[in-house]
Image (spheres, helix red, strand yellow):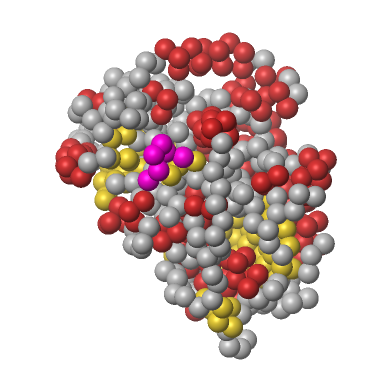
Amino acid sequence: MKSSRLVIIGIDAADHGVTSKLVEEGRMPVLSGLLARGCFTKLESTIPPQTAPAWTTITTGVNPGRHGIYYFHNFSSSPITITNATDTKTPRLWDYVAARDESSVVVNVPVTYPAQKIKGAMVAGIPPWYFDEGSVSDPALLPRLKKEGYETDAPLSRALEREPEEMAKRMVETERRRVRIFLDLLDEADWSFGMIVMTALDRLQHKAVGMGARHEEAVRRAYQDIDELVGTITQALGTDVNYVVVSDHGFNQRPVAFYPNSWLHSQGLLKRTSSFRNRLTMRAHDLFDGHLLWLPQGLTKRFQGATTVVHTIDAVDLEASRAFVPGTDGVMVVKSKGDAKAIISGLSDLKDDSGMEICKVYTREQVYTGDRVGAAPELLLVPREDINIRTDPFSPTVTSTSGKFPRGNHSSHGIFLAAGPGFKPARSPQVAIEDVTPTALAVMGIRPGSPLDGKPVEEIVRRSGDLESLTVGQEGRSHAFSEEEERQVMENLKRLGYA
């Protein structure tokens, strides 16, 4: 057993506040056991706290201004395209391991499609939500995944969302299969590095947070189930392995809806399309979805995440609009510097009925640094902690507490936990999201040959000798989704509330 072996267990949307409370209540005994011999602290997410840039920052050690991933869309392309792994040329953790001619097993890390041909094995994460030959580093893995019932996400329906216990059960079962495959792949490789991301908490919280006592208890139970799966991994691999448990962002209740696209339309900056098709689609979901709970899961997958109100980016004329918000995490596309100044002024002065500020607005230069800043969206909105951004441009009001919209969304406060022979116990060290990769590399005995934005968290890393300096070249891969693949990915983004 190599003493520098490291496994990163990603728990998408594990909130620091919720996790801390459940640990204190004794409901997450595995994490409690790990932090008793390591460290546990809050991890501040990217701005905005969104899956694609956050996981890419976690696995590269640089901010989005350098790695170039800002959302599930590429806003610098015309037309706007779906993000994939080849949109960043920044080395990932497993590239440093490969430079040492050692093996990695990587499963379900977002923005890794198409999967790299690495020494070891890779199963790509979202996007897309389907999996095919591009989802695996070795084509022989594909029939095996299908045989074992592997799913990128558990299929959902609106009817299922009204049964929170059953919804959580399906999501956790998807993660059990994922963990089983991850451990099998590790068992078959002489590995140095492993990474798995479990996404159930993110999907569940999008549907359940703020929806009532039964839904909230289903969320807490799912946190406990994920804790058990962390235990499945650590028990199988033993105490000689180093573990990092990390989330890309947190999640909190947001009972107030904010409709920036409606505000942009009122300012003459956004042009709407007809809402007839959107309303017709929603009526079709309402008509048929109530029966889906009793149908086979393969049939319900088409309706995954169906509660998303369909007044989304489809209702915006992207070509004719001078500014628009494509998703729920605060990205704003603005086509003119002059418009950007007016938007900053207008939104900064915007107050709700109680006179409270709705959001803060930042330019990309205020948030990001690096040679890819020019590809970032012009403006970034950071809403108040109780406000949920919605994309519907037809809302008659800019803010609302009524109507059909999710009552929760991503927050900035994720988790970071480290334990193992390469880590020292520490009490709540400061860890930035860019620090995860350099800290992981230091524990594995590696120092990046080129500077990263993050630094090893020195107070938690045990030194066992000099670090090996490794310079990793940029891989010249390229990939483009077909028009049909783009459509499928967009449909899933909408159903999950990202568009």
Q: Quadrant of residue 399?
A: top left
Identify the residue at the far bottom of this view. 465
Classified by dominant secondary structure, the portion drawn in magenta counts as loop
Q: How many marks?
A: 0
Return the x and y of residue 221 as percentages of the image width and height: 64, 42
Q: Quadrant of the C terminus?
A: top left
Q: Report if residue 223 lies within the magenta region.
A: no
Q: Report if residue 80 lies within the magenta region.
A: yes
Q: Who is closer to the viewer here, 48 or 294? A: 48
Decide: is 229 above or below 462: above
Q: Quadrant of the N terminus?
A: bottom right
For the point 50% across and 78% down, which residue is it?
Answer: 449
Q: Quadrant of residue 29?
A: bottom right
Return the x and y of residue 429 as percentages of the image width and height: 47, 70
Return the x and y of residue 87 as percentages of the image width and height: 49, 52
Task: Please state the extent of the stretch shown in magenta in the rendering.
Answer: 76-81
Q: Who is closer to the viewer here, 21 or 374? A: 374
